[in-house]
Structures are given as structure tokens and as C-alpha cells.
Amino acid sequence: MRLTTKGRFAVTAMIDLAQRQTGGPVTLAGISERQKISLSYLEQLFGKLRRHCIVASVRGPGGGYRLARGMQEVSVADIIAAVDEPLDATNCGGRENCQDEQRCMTHDLWTNLNKRMHEYLASVTLHDLVNQPKAKAVAATISMDDRLRGARRDNVAMSA
Amino acid sequence: MRLTTKGRFAVTAMIDLAQRQTGGPVTLAGISERQKISLSYLEQLFGKLRRHCIVASVRGPGGGYRLARGMQEVSVADIIAAVDEPLDATNCGGRENCQDEQRCMTHDLWTNLNKRMHEYLASVTLHDLVNQPKAKAVAATISMDDRLRGARRDNVAMSA
DNA sequence: AGTATAGTCGACTGAAATGTTCAAGTATTG
DNA sequence: CAATACTTGAACATTTCAGTCGACTATACT
């Protein structure tokens, strides 16, 4: 799971789309103007999102894009995976020759961290992002952080 | 907070260093061979890590690198921030002209997610990554995942 | 003192990813 | 038919990635 500006653009555009789709299909031109992302770049991103069945297109006048599923069923991880297609090489391809014992260990440690990241992003949906007034969002973040710290402490305690 | 292969290389190298530093300074040549990362690329990465006071160097024969602080005080976020230096432009620089209400809103939503990501990575230390046998690491991951799901549900419930 | 070791620095490179722009389509509405 | 809007593809400048090279400095050992 990579995390680049490309993924950010996609997530930003999807938030805009999710917020406005009640008024029918949303045009890329509109998203482009509101979010200051080049129209052609959006076309590329939404081409990928469409091929991954995250959005659906409506052609012709009055057309645009709409979500292919409910907001609860679209996670941030889905969006990023769609535009960053080649999730590929974990430097070791998964089953490649993990030569010595040591190599395998660091490899496992890394993929484990990677997995946690993915699970976290998969747990945040468009619905979560859109349906949160500012104050509440901040409060929720803090409480989640507390839980994370708690989990980490458990982790350390277990391995000590 | 970006997450690229560059950061992975740095984290992998740091894990290798953390595991071996009890035997004195660790040479980049050794890390290069064990982790299959080009020596010159490691020099660039460790130059940044040194300038951020995450590692310290020992010159001359028998020299190499060692951690500048304890493993508990080095988080994954620290490592990634050191090598990915320009954490810069959130597309909006922070205080830039968030033109209309809408623009500000999606911007807030994104930075909030970004913040959560950072807090998560900051909560995982080198110590956590190194001192965990496989089986326990997996168990810990699962239990952490449960906590995350729980936290998210609370989140949704709060905003609904 | 001299030599081997090992980090330090800077410049430079080819390949890939980013992000943008231009151009030519096709499907749909009115 | 004309306007709208998605679709596709190519070309492009810029930046980042990852590696290479060469010259240099500091230290340990003989």
C-alpha cells in the first residue's frame, strides 16, 4: 500500500463526489473547478475508479459520475488501490528467495506493518469521512488515538 | 505523510541496524548485503537519518552506524519523515486560500485522515517491530485490528 | 608515518512516476 | 443535427527513485 499525492487527489475527488451526488451525476469539470485538480488528470483517475467498479459513469448531457456502491462500502483503501494499481513488489514478491533466516525476519516485520496500515485504511469509509462535522471528527480522532496507544502498550507488554 | 518504497528501504535498514547494534557499530556494507539495498543508496538514506539525529556514525575501521536513541524512542513515522523530507504541501499549504466553504471542508476531511495515519505510524516504534516473535506479532495485529474496528464503530455511531 | 577501513559529500545518471495538455473520438439528450 | 460529457490515447515537462562514481576525511592498526 503506497500513499502518494495521487491517492490524495483521488480521495479528495471522491469526497467531493460523495457530498454532491444527491443532485444527480457529478461532472468532472465541476470537481476540477472546486478541488483545483486538472480535468485531464481527473479523467485518468476516474477511468481507473470506474474500471474498479467504485464509480459509474452517465454519458451525455446531464451526465457525469456517481458512486457505484453506497458510501459505507467504499473504503479509503479501495480508492487508493484503484488508482495506485501496481501494489506489487514487496521487494521480495512474497514467495521469492528469502535467502537467509535474517532476510525473512525483516521481511516479515515489514509486511506485518504494511498489513496493519492496509487494515486501518480499509476501516475508514467514505461515509466516515463525509458524515462528520468538524468538532466531532476531531474528538473521534483523539479517542481513536487513545485506543491505539492502549493497543500498542498491550503489544509491548506481550512481547516483553 | 507519504508512504513509498523509499520509506520501506529506510525502515527495513533500521530494523536490520536495531537487531545487530549490540555487536558494536553496524556497517552499511553489511546492511547492503543482507537487505539487498545498494550501498550508495543506503549512504543517502543514512545521511538523512543522521542529520535528523536518528542514527549516529562512527568513523574509521570497526566503525559504522548505531542508533542515536533507544529503540523505544524511534517511531516508524520518525524514520519516514527523515528520508521523505518534504512533508510539505497539503495541496493547500495549510493556511492558503481555501476559497469557498466547500474547499475548506474537503481539505479538513483529508488532513484529518492524514493526521490519523501519522499518529498511527508514530505509535509504532522500532522496539515494537524488533521484539516480536512471529506468532505474537500476528496475534497482536489481530487484536489491534479489533480495537480499530471498535473505534470506527464508535465513530460512526457518534456522527449518526 | 603509512595503510586499510569506513563514513561523508557532491554530482551525475537512466528509469519511472507525477501531473498537465492536446487531440480525436463516442454516447446521449434535446 | 448540435451540444454535452464521458472515453481514449498520445505527448510532454517535471520530479522522484535508485543507483553509480569519484574525491575526500577521520580513525585504527601496524
Image: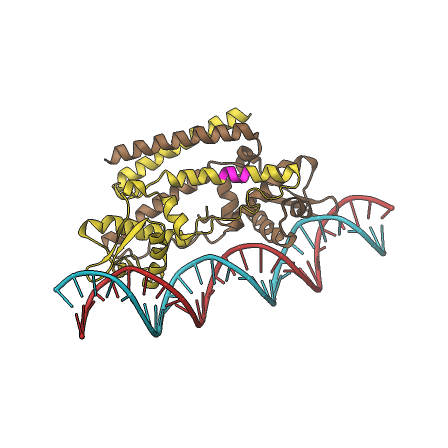
Chain colours: A yellow, B brown, C cyan, D red
Depth check: give the residue in front, B24 or A115.
A115
Magenta segment, which residues? Answer: A109-113
Residue at left offset 46%, top offset 46%: A1
What percent of the width, then of the height, locates residue B90?
Answer: 38, 53
Q: Residue at x 26, y 48 (%)?
A: A18
Q: Main secondary structure of the magenta part?
A: helix
Please say whether residue B132 is visible from this viewpoint.
no
Q: Is residue B116 above or below residue A156?
A: below
Residue B118 or residue D24, whichever sits in front: B118
Looking at the image, residue A79 lies above or below residue A28: above
Q: Residue at x 58, y 51 (%)?
A: B45
Of A154 and C27, which appears nearest the observer?
C27
Position of residue B29 in the picture relative to residue A27 (left or right): right
Pinpoint residue A128: horizontal percent, then vertical percent. Answer: 30, 40
Residue B18: where, in percent of width, then height? 61, 38
Report if residue B155 is visible in the image.
yes
Q: Is residue A112 magenta?
A: yes
